[in-house]
Amino acid sequence: MLKISIVIVAISLWAVCCFVKVNANSKDSDNEPDFPELMKICNASFSIPISDVDNFHNTGELPDTSDKTGMCYIRCMWEKSGLINNWILNADLIRSHIWPATGDALDVCANTGIDEQNACVRTYMIARCLMMRSIVDAQNKPTV
């Protein structure tokens, strides 16, 4: 039980530091997802190691896709945060939290896995597409 609590705290701290865009007004907005809380909720149902979450955010891939737990965790996060709803991507939230999802990334990735029957796999395919495009876009953008 203590190990699970430590993992949840580590995930929450990681989300605050590395995943979510820090926004001074985020507490004032009812539309802003509470990622640390969502991570706790999703991890309770679909427990995956923090290293898998880190790997996904750094590479756009989960290390093990034979087990659908990680994919279902991502589906849980994306649906509960409002990034996706009934296969419709929330462009504003995605642009504010998955930097720099630019160009045609939203249109291209929204149709990824359209024929996939498993909702966890389909959401993972969409999220992976956006993360990969975001990583590539970030590498190609000059920093000032």
Image: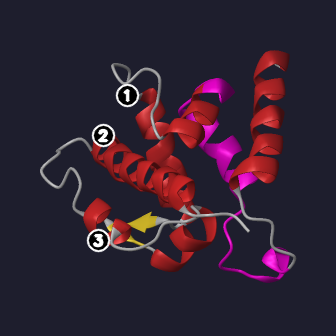
Q: Are marks 3 and 2 in contact (CB under 8 Å)?
A: no
Residue 97 image point, x, y percent: 62, 64
x, y (%) of residue 114?
Answer: 17, 55
- Left or right of 86 in this view: 139: right
Residue located at (75% from left, 48% from top): 18
Residue with the mark numbered 1? 68
Residue under pointer 2: 121
Q: Residue at x 54, y 51 (%)?
A: 77
Tell me how many marks there are. Answer: 3
Q: CA distance from mark 3 to mark 2?
A: 18 Å
Closer-to-camera residue (80/63): 63
- Closer-to-camera residue (41/121): 121
- Residue type highlighted by circle 2: Val
Q: Nearer the viewer, mark 3 or mark 2?
A: 3
Q: Is residue 81 above or below residue 51?
A: below
**Residue visible at 56% across and 57% down in the picture:** 138
Query: Do tag 1 and tag 3 residues touch (Cβ < 8 Å)?
Result: no
Is residue 5 found left or right of 89 in the rendered image?
right
Amino acid on which disc 1 is placed: Lys
Name the residue tied to disc 3.
107
**Span highlighted in magenta in the image:** 25-51
In the rendered structure, which amino acid carries the disc numbered 3? Asp
Q: Give 139 or 5, whichever is nearer the viewer.
A: 139
